[in-house]
Amino acid sequence: MTTQTATTTGVSIEPCRDAAQLREYIDTHWRKGHILARDQRMFEFQYQTPWVDRSVFPQGISVLGAYQGDRLLGFLGSIVAPYPRPQSYWLALWHVLPELKGGGQGGKLLSAMQEIAVGKDGRGGAEGGGWIGTFGAGPEALPVYLKRGYACRAVRRWIYTPALANEQASLPRSMPTNRAETDAPADWLTYRYANHPLFEYETRNQSVFRSETNPWGRVTHCVRLMGDWQGDVAETFDREALLARAQGVPYLMDAWSFDTPGPGWTLAGDDVPSVFHPPQPRGNLIYAVGRPFVPTNVQKGECDQDRPN
Ligand SMILES: CC(C)(COP(=O)(O)OP(=O)(O)OC[C@H]1O[C@@H](n2cnc3c(N)ncnc32)[C@H](O)[C@@H]1OP(=O)(O)O)[C@@H](O)C(=O)NCCC(=O)NCCS
């Protein structure tokens, strides 16, 4: 831990200058042994995507830092992706030194990132402009975004039960995207899922799954449910449930979504673990926020939600 005390004199908000310094900050101030601190590939995967504009972030790291001389006093990270607008900033990790909390530096970081993403006026037109937002804001962070004009929507966790799929067969399966949105393009899907540095995903048609055995049992995370996913969900469920039975462990399949993903899905109960490393029921409700809009669909594969800890 640093023994220096911090004041806000001479603090400037600038693009991240040095990955090693930022990773050390994350390790010291966010969490010891955090994945972005201990794994360079994950750091690069998150903050150095091919969509980062180097004329804005000269090091190719889409993070803003609060600097006082050479000292890093705080940062706001973003994952630059080509959706829901061709240049979009999904906010991921925001922190200032504890002694500076409430002193305005966090707000300055957010304003500066917002200006990069959607311009000074922050409007973002229907036909162009960028996007800024996040999936993963807790209820305590919501007022901060609401006051700044972000649209906001609750994302809930859903559990699949095959027996219900027939009963609910008439439910719509996926929502059409609104006019202002770009669907995630193929090169993003390859980057995000096929070339993930640590996780192995299974792509079936337009949907993506990740199954794991953890201390709770076997779990399939539906990180992306798009197109006509019903057969792929049913087959993946059957295969994985069999595997779990052979391993003698419980099985569940989950998804995060604004509305029900469609036939077979019901809201997760409070007692079901939502975090598996180690298993903990940490709630089945989290918020997505965005400017100038919230995307039509938000799923577990968005932002940094399906990430090793
Ligand atoms: C979140 C954080 C980066 C904000 O930085 P900060 O310098 O304290 O923020 P500011 O003083 O500029 O305040 C920005 C806004 O956030 C609000 N805010 C600050 N900390 C808050 C908190 N813990 N809970 C709720 N709101 C908070 C302020 O009221 C202010 O809102 P307003 O401008 O509408 O009045 C900082 O509090 C922090 O490091 N927190 C610990 C890590 C964390 O929780 N990160 C967010 C989740 S990724």
Image (cartoon, helix red, strand yellow):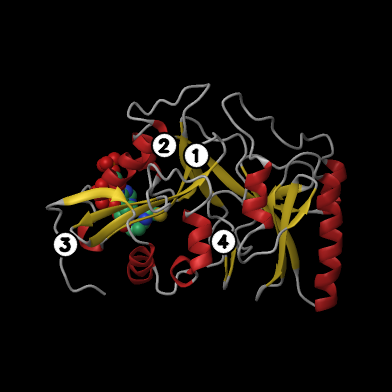
Task: Mark 2 or mark 1: name the one nearer the start of the chain.
Answer: 1
Query: Closer to us: mark 2 or mark 4?
Result: 2
Q: Which mark is residue 88?
A: 1
Q: Quadrant of residue 73?
A: bottom left
Label 2 packing within 10 angstroms: few (<14), some (14-19), many (20+): many
In this view of the protein, which residue sits in the foreground, 62 or 113?
62
Answer above or below: position of 202 versus 186: below
Q: Amino acid at mark 3?
A: Ala
User: Which residue, given by chain and number where applicable, does mark 2 sit on?
Assistant: 117
Q: Are marks 2 and 1 in contact (CB under 8 Å)?
A: yes
Q: In terms of sequence position, does the residue under pointer 2 or pointer 4 come before the other?
A: 2
Q: Which residue is mark 3?
A: 6
Q: Which quarter of the image is occupied by the N terminus?
A: bottom left
Q: Say what secondary structure mark 1 lies in.
A: strand
- The residue under label 4 is 307
Q: Earlier in the sequence, mark 3 or mark 1?
A: 3
Identify the amino acid type marked 4.
Answer: Arg
Q: Position of residue 41 (x, y in %)?
A: 53, 65
Give the residue displayed 53% in from the left and 42% down from the top. 154
Q: What distance separates the C-alpha of mark 2 from that of mark 4?
A: 24 Å
Q: Residue at x 46, y 72 (%)?
A: 38
Local crowd size for mark 1, using a 10 Å CA cut-off: few (<14), some (14–19), many (≥20): many
Question: Height in image: 159 above or below 171?
Answer: below
Of 178 and 186, which appears nearest the observer? Answer: 186
For label 3, the SS is loop
